[in-house]
Image (cartoon, rainbow, N blue to C red):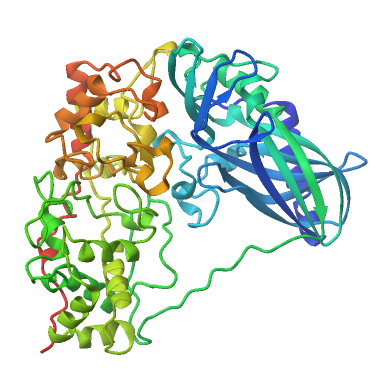
């Protein structure tokens, strides 16, 4: 990353903010509820819907719009302002995150709301692992950290364009680095006492067609905010002018609902010590299912218990073997307890504590929901939950359930809780790559070249010729755990529509969850349908096999037809790097042996 550049107004703003922190805090005051809506020429923006550009009749649709705001302040009528310190917001069109609640606003009259698009240099380059799981700057929550390149992406704006002559492509605008920090000033007329609400609007049509219009085409397909990046400056200048306020109301604050949950745990159960690599972000562990030593042990036993299937012939471990990164080693599709073959490849089971959607299509929102699905699926274990409960009662598990949950009752909810606890402990983060990052080992020249390719964009306009892998597989977890169409031949498995079967949105057709690349050398075959048997085939797909379609991920659609051109030598280097992500300690021999022994 290049050295930061700043404008004097921004420097003055942050210096003034620091000086006024204590006074604003001690003043007490009102609550200011700020919401942001994204519109195009007055119409509320919907993901995947095409909108016509005001400058050249180009149709544009949005696949991602995520951004970070910070350093909010309100400006009095006399021009003085009150900084609302330590205020950060992560906004996401796709995740429907559109609200930030600001506190300690002094009562009074105000004419302007100020905030920064982006983060101050001190915050931008601080350790991202310090932020809790619900903090707007937690990298797992926002997916906007540059990973080992350092700092955050301040705004990710991605989508597709189509000209009137039918020419089409993707755009990927990642506005970040310290030079992208911009101050936004929105006029308001606010008299505040106790509480107030402000509705802001980001007019997205102005971002493309503002004072410095951005025409669609291959020359404007991407930006990553490098020094002297004219396109980034053009977009940022438009962004500053793209904000309006639509409504200001007072005394209407409605607090965010506090989630209610019930904890089911034995009072004397010792807590399990959850350990993770220092480079990992803080995970969001389930508050209603704290990890305990007996709970994790019970979950491990259940994971290896064939009594969870209809005929006692299959356990979870049958298709998720620890020696193969918890996949069904070498198999494209797994066979269920009764011999039926599935139609999706078994996903690896590690680092699940950082994920919020499960299965290739994301249909389960928690591990507790996910673990019960294979048990009941007719193609997989094909059991009923009542049968499983009966099997476990007869199998002598009552003592283990009592140790974990306080009494010997066995229920489907407790089965799911125990399995969830065990699966959350499967942490993989001790590969050669991690040891290189810690200075304990050195990479070979080929591995180092592969690392460089992995984390470098393919952007010939700026003399960048990387493999562009990190957009979907960046960060300490080597996945954004989002859903993407990665250019597979749709006709080869046309019946599987992926994420769209869950969301019912055509814009999600052929999108599947991004798996982690940790342990990737041990978890083949690859893709949701296991069509590729080797890493060589996978890399070859991204080099020359990418198929264009309406939902192809913008970070692939911006590239030449077929994919990112890499030489044979660079392909080998990339694979050499991927092999450094194998955690040899993760597949321990005793993981297949349950630590809970059912009592007769």
Give x and y (percent) for residue 378. Answer: 18, 61
Report the front residue among 17 and 107. Answer: 107
Q: Is residue 340 left or right of residue 436?
A: left
Q: Residue furthest right?
A: 78
Q: Residue at x 65, y 51 (%)?
A: 100
Task: Locate residue 559: give its quadrant.
Answer: top left
Give x and y (percent) for residue 249. Answer: 81, 52
Task: Locate residue 194: give its quadrant.
Answer: bottom right
Q: Is residue 268 left or right of residue 54?
A: left
Task: Locate residue 513: give its quadrant.
Answer: top left
- Vertical placement of residue 261 versus 446, above or below: below
Q: Is residue 146 left or right of residue 436?
A: right
- Vertical placement of residue 199 versus 394, above or below: above
Give x and y (percent) for residue 576. Answer: 18, 31
Q: Residue at x 13, y 34 (%)?
A: 534
Report the front residue among 171 and 343. Answer: 343
Give x and y (percent) for residue 375. Answer: 21, 66
Q: Residue at x 41, y 45 (%)?
A: 504
Q: Residue at x 37, y 41 (%)?
A: 483
- Vertical placement of residue 464 versus 138, above or below: above
The quarter of the picture where the C terminus appears is bottom left
Q: How many marks?
A: 0
- Vertical placement of residue 382 versus 548, above or below: below
For the question of whether residue 484 can be seen, the reply is: yes
For the question of whether residue 321 can be seen, the reply is: no
């Amino acid at each position: 990353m290049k050295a930061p550049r700043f404008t004097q107004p921004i420097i003055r703003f942050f210096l003034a903010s620091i000086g006024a922190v204590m006074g604003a805090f001690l003043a007490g005051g009102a609550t200011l509820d700020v919401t942001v809506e994204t519109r195009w020429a007055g119409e509320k923006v919907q993901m995947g819907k095409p909108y016509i550009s005001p400058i050249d009749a180009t149709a544009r649709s949005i696949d991602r719009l995520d951004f970070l705001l910070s350093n909010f302040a309100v400006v009095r009528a006399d021009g003085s302002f009150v900084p609302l310190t330590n205020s950060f917001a992560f906004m996401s069109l796709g995740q429907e995150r559109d609200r930030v609640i600001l506190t300690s606003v002094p009562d009074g009259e105000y004419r302007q709301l100020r905030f920064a698009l982006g983060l101050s240099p001190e915050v931008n380059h601080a350790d991202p692992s310090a932020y809790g799981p619900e903090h707007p700057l937690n990298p797992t929550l926002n997916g906007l950290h540059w990973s080992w390149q350092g700092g955050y992406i301040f705004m990710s704006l991605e989508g597709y364009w189509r000209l009137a002559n039918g020419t089409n492509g993707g755009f990927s605008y990642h506005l970040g680095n310290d030079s992208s920090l911009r101050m936004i000033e929105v006029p308001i007329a606010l008299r505040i006492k106790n509480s107030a609400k402000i509705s802001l609007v980001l007019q997205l049509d102005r971002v493309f067609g503002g004072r410095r219009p951005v025409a669609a085409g291959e020359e404007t397909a991407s930006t990553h905010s490098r020094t002297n990046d004219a396109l980034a400056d053009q977009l940022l200048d438009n962004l500053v002018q793209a904000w309006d306020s639509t409504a200001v109301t007072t005394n209407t604050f409605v607090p965010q609902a506090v989630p209610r949950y019930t904890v089911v745990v034995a009072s004397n159960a010792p807590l399990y010590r959850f350990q993770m690599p220092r480079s990992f972000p803080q995970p969001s562990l389930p508050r209603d299912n704290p990890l305990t030593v007996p709970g994790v042990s019970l979950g491990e036993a259940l994971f290896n218990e064939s009594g969870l299937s209809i005929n006692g012939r299959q356990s979870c471990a049958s298709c998720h073997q620890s020696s193969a990164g918890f996949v069904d080693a070498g198999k494209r599709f797994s066979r269920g307890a009764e011999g039926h073959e599935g139609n999706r490849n078994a996903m690896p089971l590690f680092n699940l504590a950082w994920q919020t959607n499960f299965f290739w299509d994301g249909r389960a929102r928690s591990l507790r929901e996910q673990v019960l699905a294979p048990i009941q699926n007719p193609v997989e274990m094909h059991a009923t939950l009542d049968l499983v409960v009966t099997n476990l009662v007869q199998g002598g598990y009552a003592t283990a359930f009592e140790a974990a949950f306080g009494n010997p009752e066995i229920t489907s909810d407790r089965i799911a809780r125990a399995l969830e606890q065990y699966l959350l402990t499967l942490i993989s983060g001790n590969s050669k790559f991690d040891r290189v990052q810690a200075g304990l080992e050195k990479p070979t020249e080929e591995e180092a070249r592969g690392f460089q390719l992995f984390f470098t964009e393919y952007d010939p306009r700026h003399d960048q010729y990387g493999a562009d892998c990190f957009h979907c597989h960046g960060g300490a977890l080597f996945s954004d755990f989002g859903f993407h169409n990665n250019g597979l031949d749709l006709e080869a498995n046309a019946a599987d529509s992926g994420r769209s079967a869950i969301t019912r949105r055509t814009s999600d057709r052929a999108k599947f969850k991004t798996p982690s690349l940790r342990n990737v050398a041990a978890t083949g075959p690859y893709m949701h349908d296991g069509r590729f048997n080797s890493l060589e085939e996978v890399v070859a797909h991204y080099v020359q096999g990418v198929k264009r379609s309406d939902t192809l991920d913008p970070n692939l659609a911006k590239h030449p037809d077929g994919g990112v051109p890499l030489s044979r030598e660079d392909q080998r280097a990339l694979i050499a790097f991927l092999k450094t992500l194998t955690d040899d300690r993760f597949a321990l021999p005793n993981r297949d042996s349950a630590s809970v022994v059912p009592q007769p």
